[in-house]
Image (cartoon, rainbow, N blue to C red):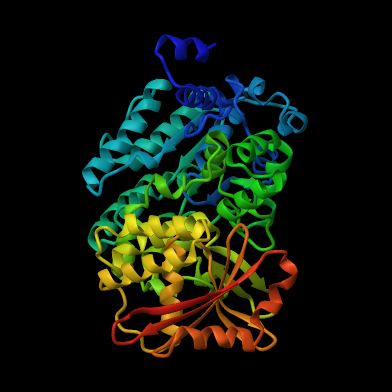
Amino acid sequence: MLNVAAMANEYDMSDIEARRLEEKRAAYNSRYLIGTPVFSELREGNYFYIDKTEYVYNMTHSGARYVFLSRPRRFGKSLLVSTLKCYFEGRKDLFKGLAIDKLETEWERYPVLSFDMSGVKTDDVNSLNRYILNQLMTYEKKFNTDPVGFGDVNIRFMNLIQNVHEQTGKKVVVLIDEYDSPILNVVHDEDNFTVIRDLMRNFYSPLKGCGDCLKFVFITGITKFSQMSIFSALNNITNISMEEEFAAVCGITEEELLSQMPEEVDKLAAKQGMTREEALREIKIMYDGYHFCWPSPDIYNPHSLMNALRWKKLESYWFDTGTPTYLINIMNKFSVNAKDIEDIRLCGREAFDAPTEKMTNIIPLFYQSGYFTIKDYSEDDDAYVLDIPNREIRVGLYRSLLPNYIWEYTDSERLIRRISNMLRKDRIDEAFEGLQTFLSTIPYLAGARNEADCQRDLCILLSACGVSPRLEERTAAGRIDLVYASRKKTYIIELKLDRNAEEALRQINDKDYAARYALTGFPVIKIGVNFSSSTRNITDWAIEE
């Protein structure tokens, strides 16, 4: 055990430094093992594990031989693949005390071939071919089979499956994690896309021809297999991505958070100076909101939630792991307009379940990558509503991604963070001074044509600063331009173009917009804002508490 007090004396540390060291020690001794999607390591090391093994049992006993699951990156797909590997290898000891321990009675062992395609970081077809051959060679050595076909990945793969089946007398389990990773690297490049896709289709083709040798095939990815021509021969895959039964197979539900992580929530609350209820509310706003079907329980982003509980800080963990290059390339390709990526209403799931190689807009990839999620559904007209799932994604998109398309101001990050800090502390005058400075320094607005343009532009800036404004909130007397809530207050904002802030503020009072929020228990702050079409900036604002 690390003796912090002794170290403080020996090195003449201050009390603050000693406490920080203690916090680091506690974090590193945490029961959370993050970024290690290896089921056996979690179980053998007695690390925290959300029990998803009932889904494993249901999936493998459903009668489906080929199963596909789509989920965003870092959502637990690789851990699920690792869990399946241990299950089919018959490692019963690892599952003691878990749900499947009471369900499974046979624990029969099968040979498992598990391929991880996420390690491919190249758009060169020869490098990709070598990467696949290296994975095949690993299993050829393990099962002592002679390679056939050498450079032909499909022949090598087919030979491997057949030989393993003959040698063991057991049908083979094939697990493929992140099957589409090589394709997503080049999805913006039509020429390279075709070459890479054809190689991947060639590699996966034995999954159809070796059906008699296979016990179970599980494939994960970000994009949907059913639209990808590389699986055109496999017409019997069961896609569980939008099935209600498997809605929570990856990610963490609110029930799991409350029942299995209460102590960690309390520790985060104490560190942040919140009550438990306040902490749960902030955690929900920050990381919750995913739905992969409808109806669906609310799903928390597991990577961000686990990191937040480990480090006791509500930070942007998932988004900060890096915006995928393919997403930026696709946004460039489609010239995405930053003003048109929220509250998307679509008819039929095929509108966002679209083929990746045939996309005509960014929506399918935004949904499949986890930047959009299903927020509502109307069975009457088969209409879905897609939107940004939570604050982490909203802030990440507007602060780190969208600036690539709407401004070139190199110091934007510093200023945005300063404005965000002012908003968080409810220092509204200083925040609007920052917004005014921001707009005066950069070529942001192409020209405000009407009040709706001003409304959308201010919404973009506030979103980048960490708040979640709602547009066009309905009241009995009309619609409010913008509304957002801080931890302690509700803000109502009315906008005018080429008029004045007092007139905007007067409209809030004349129509009694604040009445709608009287029962929230939070003070309502009214803000009138005026934009100038000539300066393309905020000219004045008025605040009334």
Outermost residue, right side:
102
Which is more toward the observer, 269 or 380? 269
Which is more toward the observer, 533 or 398? 533
Q: Quadrant of the C terminus?
A: bottom right
Q: Residue at x 55, y 60 (%)?
A: 389
Q: Quadrant of the N terminus?
A: top right
Q: Residue at x 39, y 56 (%)?
A: 418
Relative to 180, say whether 408 is above or below: below
* Image location (x, y in percent) of residue 348: 57, 74
* Image location (x, y in percent) of residue 91: 62, 22
Image position of 95 (left or right of 138): right
Relative to 317, say whether 507 is above or below: below
Q: Which residue is drawn at 47% across and 28% down?
A: 164
* Image location (x, y in percent) of residue 69: 55, 50
Image position of 505 (left or right of 476): left
Q: Say whether residue 97 is visible.
A: yes
Image position of 411 (left or right of 144): left
Which is more toward the observer, 33 or 267? 267
* Image location (x, y in percent) of residue 169: 55, 25
Which is more toward the observer, 184 or 533? 533
